[in-house]
Image (cartoon, rainbow, N blue to C red):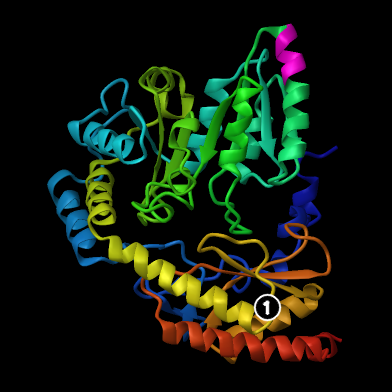
């Protein structure tokens, strides 16, 4: 079979198959102007609910100043080389130390990218004797890391502790024969549903089974907990999380990630993560910019308070008006409607073109057929007026959806 047959026949997978009509509007849209709740899309100003700029730091004046000054002082090339060989600096180490202390761990290690980092963490931690047990709705970076594993892996139903324990039992029987260990992987906040991972319930099973717990808290770092330390802080189970993974792309509006754990685990990862051993270190302007972002995250709790005020107003308003927002218990706000792909695209276009609301649309195969999910991401910079405008727009389009307007329009 021709390796490129799917390209030659314009088959791009479950999402890419729609590229001919969706590219540039539903997929790969261009949002222009300053990063803000109000940006330009398709030549018009829109109220945007699709940016993971949770604390509004992307265009914070102190952040812009730090980024610009660091670029002027160091350029984008410094330091040259991988951290292990020639790319280490005191700024990298200082950021690691601060992050570790903040999330309640002994040490931390910077990663160039979150996605690449998670894949490499999993690859470094396990071998063919070990078993991975992971949540069915884990992020794609976890799934890709698990795919590289040469040993057994078991998936449990999303946030289902009974299912989780059954998979643990399967894993336990295998490692008793192989002499390996069990790595459990879940998320602090699941980015699509907004549900928190059941960290405390998972950790409670350490009394019956022996395993290490790796938590991907990309959405929880900086947003969850009294200090914003993460979902493990919010659930009061910091010590039970063996490896804590956070990214800079969400609450800190940057690039990169980190892994935090006991010192011996981090030292092992420093020398065994191929994505870091064989890749150039994070450039100095990024690291210094991240230090400024982290400083603002810690010293400005009102940013997190603003985020949650907007999130609660949005979610309570949606529920009061009869919308289904699923099981979210975080700031991530999904809105579930019933309809097919044609209705979903018509509804989304009307939100954008008539009401000036830009939010992400999610359809099959990410969610079951017959459902439409509109995903809204509140930030500290949104206002209650933004919420009111959005509620009005959602009421208008949902009424037309129930009346069959979009089905008739598609026909």
Of residue 296 and residue 354, the one placed in the foreground of this image is 296
Residue at point 49%, 82% (across, down)? 387
In the image, residue 310 above or below residue 220 = below
In this rendered view, identify the residue nearer to me: 131 or 105: 105
SS label for mark 1: loop
Query: Range of the magenta residues?
Result: 172-177
Where does residue 374 sit, x and y in percent of width and height? Answer: 64, 71
Residue 70 in percent (x, y) is at 17, 49
Q: Residue at x 46, y 36 (%)?
A: 244
Residue 409 shows up from this direction: no
| In this rendering, position of residue 331 left or right of residue 79 | right
Location of residue 132 by image quarter: top right
Residue 135 at x, y percent in the picture: 68, 40
Measuring from the top left, give residue 353's x and y in whole percent.
59, 88
Prevailing secondary structure of the magenta residues? helix
Q: Tell me how many marks there are.
A: 1
Please check the rendered image and state whether residue 176 is part of the magenta-colored stretch, yes or no.
yes
Q: Is residue 59 left or right of residue 214?
A: left
User: Residue at the spot x=72%, y=58% of the render?
Assistant: 15
Q: Examine the rendering and report whether any part of residue 291 can be seen.
A: yes
Residue 275 included in the magenta stretch of the image? no
Q: Is residue 409 left or right of residue 78?
A: right
Q: Is residue 27 left or right of residue 263?
A: right
Give the residue pinned by disc 1. Answer: 323
Quarter of the rendering occupied by the C terminus: bottom right
- Name the quadrant of the N terminus: top right
Depth order, front residue of 96/165: 165
């Amino acid at each position: 079979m021709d390796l490129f047959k799917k390209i030659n026949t314009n088959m791009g997978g479950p999402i890419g198959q729609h590229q001919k009509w969706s590219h540039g509007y539903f997929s790969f849209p261009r949002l222009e102007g300053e990063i803000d709740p109000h940006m330009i899309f398709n030549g018009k100003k829109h109220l945007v609910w699709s940016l993971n700029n949770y604390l509004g730091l992307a265009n914070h004046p102190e952040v812009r100043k730090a980024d610009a000054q660091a670029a002027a002082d160091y350029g984008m090339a410094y330091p040259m080389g991988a951290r292990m060989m020639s790319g280490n600096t005191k700024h990298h180490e200082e950021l690691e130390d601060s992050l570790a202390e903040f999330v309640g761990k002994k040490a931390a290690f910077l990663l160039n990218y979150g996605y690449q980092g998670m894949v490499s963490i999993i690859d470094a931690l396990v071998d063919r004797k070990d078993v991975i047990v992971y949540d069915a709705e884990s992020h794609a970076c976890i799934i890709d890391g698990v795919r590289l594993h040469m040993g057994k892996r078991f998936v449990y139903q999303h946030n289902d502790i009974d299912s989780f324990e059954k998979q643990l039992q399967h894993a336990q029987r295998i490692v008793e024969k192989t002499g390996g260990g069990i790595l459990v992987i879940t998320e602090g906040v699941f980015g699509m549903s907004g549900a928190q991972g059941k960290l405390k319930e998972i950790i409670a099973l350490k009394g019956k089974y022996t395993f290490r717990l790796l938590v991907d808290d990309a959405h929880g770092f900086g947003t969850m907990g009294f200090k914003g330390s993460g979902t493990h802080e919010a659930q009061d189970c910091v010590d039970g999380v063996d490896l804590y993974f956070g990214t800079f792309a969400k609450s800190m509006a940057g690039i990169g990630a980190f892994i935090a754990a006991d010192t011996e685990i981090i030292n092992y990862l420093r020398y065994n993560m191929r994505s870091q051993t064989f890749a150039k270190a994070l450039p100095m302007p990024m690291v210094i910019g991240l230090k400024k972002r982290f400083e603002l995250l810690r010293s400005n709790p009102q940013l997190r308070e603003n985020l949650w005020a907007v999130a609660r107003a949005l979610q309570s308003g949606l529920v009061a008006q009869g919308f289904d927002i699923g099981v979210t218990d975080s700031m991530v706000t999904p809105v579930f409607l019933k309809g097919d792909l044609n209705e979903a695209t018509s509804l989304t276009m009307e939100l954008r073109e008539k009401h000036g609301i830009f939010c992400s649309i999610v359809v099959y195969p990410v969610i079951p057929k017959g459902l439409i999910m509109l995903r809204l991401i509140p930030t500290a910079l949104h206002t209650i007026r933004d919420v009111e405008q959005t509620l009005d727009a959602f009421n208008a389009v949902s009424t037309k959806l129930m009346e069959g307007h979009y089905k008739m329009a598609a026909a």
